[in-house]
Amino acid sequence: MAIGSYDREELNELLEGRQFRKLRETMSEMNEVDIAEFIEELEAEKKVLVYRMLPKELAADVFSFLEVDDQEHIINSITDAEVSKIIEDLFVDDAVDMLEELPATVVKRVMRTAGTETRQLINQFLQYPENSAGSIMTAEYIGLKKYMNVEQAFAYIRAHGVDKETIYTCFVTDGQRRLEGVVTIK
């Protein structure tokens, strides 16, 4: 059966045949959702093995699409450094969604490995009531200053947009980070 445009049987054959380099290459060309679906269908010990094979730039995206039980299993099976990499690479709102579902012992481990800034942002988001604007907003946005001209704004977006969840709507703020207005890329 095909996953997206990839053959599940082929992926399983590569895994069973221990052709890990070819499996990694194949997964690096796949969609994150399809990879998560493939991992979820594996036996517990193979889930971690396959997850660890993922290219670093793909791993956090795949992780965010896994079921909570699989996220917990992976977190419990990998090193603190690997946990830290996942949490730092996730968008803060995705990390918060994940942490709200995990048992307290796992959350403590994840929070212990997170960087200071990430930990503070996560704690801030966790304090918002469920389904409030604060609980569903993102912290990864482009913030522009009203004195910027178009050229400066685009230079700033190019330099800082890579790590942001949304770049198509930019928020203009004053020196105290109060909202002055909104600008769309269009």
Image (cartoon, helix red, strand yellow):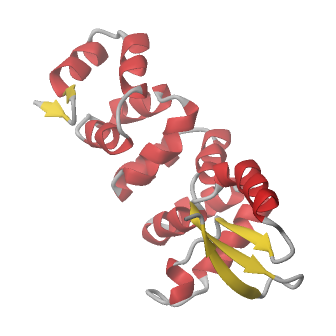
Classify residue 127 by image quadrant: bottom right
Vertical arrangement, residue 65 with respect to residue 40, above or below: below
Quadrant for the N terminus, please. Answer: top left
Residue 185 vs residue 31: left or right?
right
* Residue 125: image location, x then y, percent: 61, 78
Vertical arrangement, residue 61 with respect to residue 14, above or below: below
Task: Give the residue at x 78% y 88%.
Answer: 178
* Residue 60: image location, x then y, percent: 52, 45
Task: Give the residue at x 35% y 38%.
Answer: 31
Vertical arrangement, residue 118 with respect to residue 37, above or below: below
Classify residue 176 by image quadrant: bottom right
- Seen from the viewer's position, the closer of residues 141 and 26 is 141
- Seen from the viewer's position, the closer of residues 183 and 10 is 183
Task: Give the residue at x 67% y 54%.
Answer: 161
Q: How many marks?
A: 0
* Residue 158: image location, x then y, percent: 71, 49
Task: Give the residue at x 49% y 30%.
Answer: 52
- Seen from the viewer's position, the closer of residues 142 and 186 is 186
Quadrant for the C terminus, please. Answer: bottom right
Q: Residue furthest left?
A: 1
Residue 54 vs residue 46: left or right?
right
